[in-house]
Amino acid sequence: MFPQRLDSTLAYDVAKAMMDGFNRHYRLFRTESARAKHRFETADWHGQQRAQRERIEFYDLRVRECSRRLEREFKAGEQPMDIWQQIKLHYIGLLVNHHQPELAETFFNSVTTKILHRSYFQNDFIFVRPAVSTEYIENSEPESRPTYRAYYPASGDLGQVLLRMVQDFDLCLSFEDLQGDAALVEAAMLARLGEAKLRANFQIQVLTGLFFRNKGCYVVGKLINGFSEFAFALPVLHNAAGKLMIDAALFGEDDLLLLFSFARAYFMVDMEIPSAYVQFLRSMMPRKPRNEIYNALGLAKQGKTLYYRDFLHHLRHSSDRFRIAPGIKGMVMLVFDLPSFPYVFKVIKDYYPPQKDTSREQIKRKYLLVKQHDRVGRMADTLEYSEVGFPRDRFDDELIAEILEFAPSQIEVSDRDGDGQIEVILKHVYIERRMIPLNIYLQEALDAGGAQADPQDPVAVRSRQQIERAVVEYGNAIKDLVAANIFPGDMLWKNFGVTRHGKVVFYDYDEIEYITDCHFRKVPTPRNEEEEMSGEVWYNVGPRDVFPETFAPFLLGNPAVREAFMKHHADLLDVAFWQGHKERILAGHVFDVFPYDREKRFHPEQER
């Protein structure tokens, strides 16, 4: 019995070391998130951006630290599998009464799969399914704050309750006119309630952590009245005088979905019990997958875990096959999808045409840049996976042939695990939310009658309106990217998509550059007739030279599209627009990019 007791002690020590590694990770994650409040109060916008980038790297750093410790102290990779089964059981015991059990399980998986061979990536050794429930976890520490506070306005004092609600966040910077802002929020809430009678349970529930992102913070909660619930968010910003103001009142699931969009940077919010935040937010946005809520809260590894579980569940309950994604094929990415599943899968090709002077590592760096950057609602977030196995019988033969032709280094088709199941293993894949490619969206509108000019034809009128909305959104997307110091590189319509909310989002990252690294130039005036008539570029062009006036021939071939573009976004063809933004960014200016429409703002005059 003595060796067995030693084995049990070893297994417990390994499990405890893993838990120590996770607790250290989450302590650092919370500390950095909590510091966002001070950065907001002191208007340290560059510090906020830097912290956003650095926090994304925390998880992988802690996983590497923990893996090295387990190898150094316990020779973990050399331990037999019965020890690893005991390690998992001890780890489950340590999760009892833990406040972040789902995150700790994911951390265990990350460390374990870094040490063990892929053939052990199964339920016996990792958490394929959660072992500990996250329901009704409470923080019982005496000085702890609850996940949310409840306020109970009586008749006529809603404004005063809202005033107290905001003051309870203890922001160390004064408001310009909090009383007036509370009155504006009160009026908006009463308008939202309409003629509804205030019921006995009328209350406001608000999450106790402020949500920080870019130059703003958000109070997030819901109104409850009888059987009705109304989600809301209150953006708090600095005004031109350096004081605080409530800038808007956002209501309902659609407004919240845009605020928590997959095309925006992650929030910083100090959470003791993240699952309780996710549960609260899911009650406000029931259509938003839990994995995307975890992502929005900065817990991207947990988002990946939940996404993969959802994906496996969907595979078990569907029968359609993966196919080459519709649309124009990319030069550097091979894109495929499963029609019944709302995501696309992207594999970097092995070969690129001559005009694409790039490499696999450069493309990966571009995608990492986007992950760490402020995406301002205009760049889709990506989930990145390695060594992903798919059932072979779910793949179209045409798709397999396409991957073998253009990305042979990235695919293996075999019974790698020896269980008789033929798998397609992809070495590296990006996964994004599926959108309608903008070129297809515009073509459908043109085909439906948008190319006609007949003002009496209602179909043509609707199609022209659809074209104009899409072109306006396209230009707004580029301008938001410019404000975030991003030059898209390839601005063709096919590289943008339309979301279910009608927002235009960029998703092709292999040519993006910082605006501040680009040289915006005007096409030189020809010096003679030979240069003027030349079909070739006769002037010198550097590797990062950009000539905005040359965008038009590639983008504006259709008259209906050209008319809408020139009406709303002609400045994008002017070098002065680009150079002006570059100079302001170089001077240290951080632009405001709002996750809500201008007409929702209480103080639209406070432009900075």
Image (tube, helix red, strand yellow):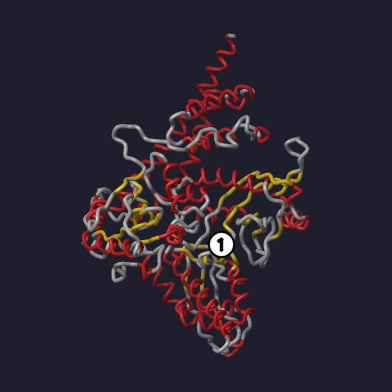
Q: Which quadrant of the structure image shows residue 316? A: top right
Within 10 Å of disc 1 (Cα), the crowding (few <14, some 14-19, many 20+) is many
| Residue 32 in view here | yes
The single residue placed furthest to the top in the displayed view is: 1
Instruction: State the residue at coordinates (62%, 33%).
Output: 123
Q: Label 1 is placed on what type of residue? A: Tyr
For residue 591, side relative to residue 410 (left or right)? left
- Is 489 left or right of 223, judged from the image as shown? right
Find residue 566 and report its horizontal and vertical position in percent.
49, 82
Kindly identify which residue carries mark 1. 507
**In this orientation, which residue lies closer to the viewer: 392 or 346?**
392
In this rendering, the answer to whether 534 lies above or below 280 is: below
In the image, residue 270 above or below residue 438: above
Q: Position of residue 406 (x, y in %)?
A: 72, 57
- Residue 398: image x %, image y %? 77, 58
Left or right: 557 in relation to 405: left
Q: Residue at x 42, y 72 (%)?
A: 579
User: Residue sitting at 73 percent across and 50 percent down?
Assistant: 394
Q: Going 36% across and 64% down the picture, which residue do you hit? A: 592
User: Where, quadrant-wise, is the C terminus in this rendering?
Assistant: bottom left
Quarter where residue 460 is shown: bottom right
Secondary structure under tag 1 reads: loop
**Viewer-proximal residue among 335 and 596:** 596
Above or below 260: residue 12: above
